């Protein structure tokens, strides 16, 4: 009986110990679960905070991207405006340069009307003013039309306006021809002689002497004509006028 009580006591003690152990284990489990829940809650809170922060960052990034896109669009429009302005400016510059070129060309052309230019007449080259050239050619054209009186007036006026002209000797020659045609032989002789005296090497000099002799013949001054023809043959033996002079000499008595 005593043994039974001891055994019962031992069993009771074991049961009490197991109950306490189980109770202890339950408390530990609850605390572990609470800790775990707290950790999970904290982790979720961090995740929530991180997500919120990420959303905020994404929103800020989207706003920044939108601002950047707007700035790019503004810059694109500004660049397009600048390109348009540059194109307009380039066109304006090109137009201005073209106008300046046309103006410069026009000025050059107008200046050329007043600037001396090189001309060649009767084997001579010299500089002549445009008006001088025009006046000489106009007088010569009048002579060729057979208006000898007007030609005489034109050549006399020409030599008065341009006393140092390179055309002077040629003008004397054609003036004398106009006077010959008008039968003003004395004036013709004077001007033919003036040509030979001023420029003995002039291309028209031999012809001027021959024409002088013709005038003298018309004036019935055969002696003077013979002398002029002899002068021509001696001074210009190779000229065509000298060949004609020789024939004339053979016929003059």
Image (cartoon, helix red, strand yellow):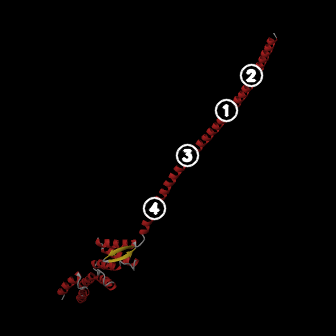
Q: Which mark is residue 26?
A: 2
Q: Is residue 98 left or right of residue 200?
A: right
- Disc on the earlier residue, 3 or 4: 3
Q: Is residue 15 left or right of residue 249?
A: right
Determine the CA span between mark 1 and mark 2: 30 Å
- The residue closer to the viewer here, 168 or 156, is 168
Label 1 sits on a secondary structure element that is helix
Q: Which residue is mark 3?
A: 76
The image shows residue 247 at horizontal and vertical percentages of 18, 84
**Quarter of the C terminus within the rendering:** bottom left
Q: Which residue is mark 1?
A: 47
The image shows residue 163 at horizontal and vertical percentages of 39, 80
Say which residue appears at 57% left-offset and 46% top-offset.
75
- Disc on the earlier residue, 1 or 4: 1
Q: Residue furthest left?
A: 251
Circle 3 packing at 10 Å, graded few (<14), some (14-19), many (20+), is few
């Amino acid at each position: 009986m005593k043994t039974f009580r001891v055994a019962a006591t031992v069993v009771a003690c074991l049961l009490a110990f197991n109950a306490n152990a189980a109770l202890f284990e339950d408390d530990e489990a609850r605390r572990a679960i609470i800790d775990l829940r707290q950790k999970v809650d904290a982790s979720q809170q961090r995740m929530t905070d991180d997500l919120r922060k990420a959303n905020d960052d994404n929103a800020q990034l989207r706003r920044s991207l939108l601002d950047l896109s707007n700035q790019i669009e503004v810059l694109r429009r500004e660049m397009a405006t600048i390109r348009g302005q540059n194109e307009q400016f380039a066109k304006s510059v090109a137009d201005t340069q073209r106008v300046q070129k046309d103006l410069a060309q026009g000025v050059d052309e107008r200046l050329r009307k007043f600037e001396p230019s090189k001309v060649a007449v009767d084997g001579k080259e010299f500089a002549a003013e445009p008006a001088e050239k025009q006046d000489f050619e106009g007088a010569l054209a009048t002579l060729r039309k057979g208006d000898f009186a007007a030609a005489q007036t034109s050549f006399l006026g020409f030599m008065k306006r341009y006393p140092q002209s390179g055309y002077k000797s040629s003008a004397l020659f054609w003036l004398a021809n106009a006077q010959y045609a008008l039968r003003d032989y004395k004036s013709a002789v004077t001007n033919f002689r003036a040509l030979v005296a001023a420029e003995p090497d002039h291309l028209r000099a031999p012809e001027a002497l021959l024409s002088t002799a013709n005038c003298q013949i018309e004036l019935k001054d055969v002696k003077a004509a013979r002398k002029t023809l002899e002068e021509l043959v001696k001074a210009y033996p190779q000229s065509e006028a000298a060949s004609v002079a020789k024939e004339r000499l053979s016929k003059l008595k």
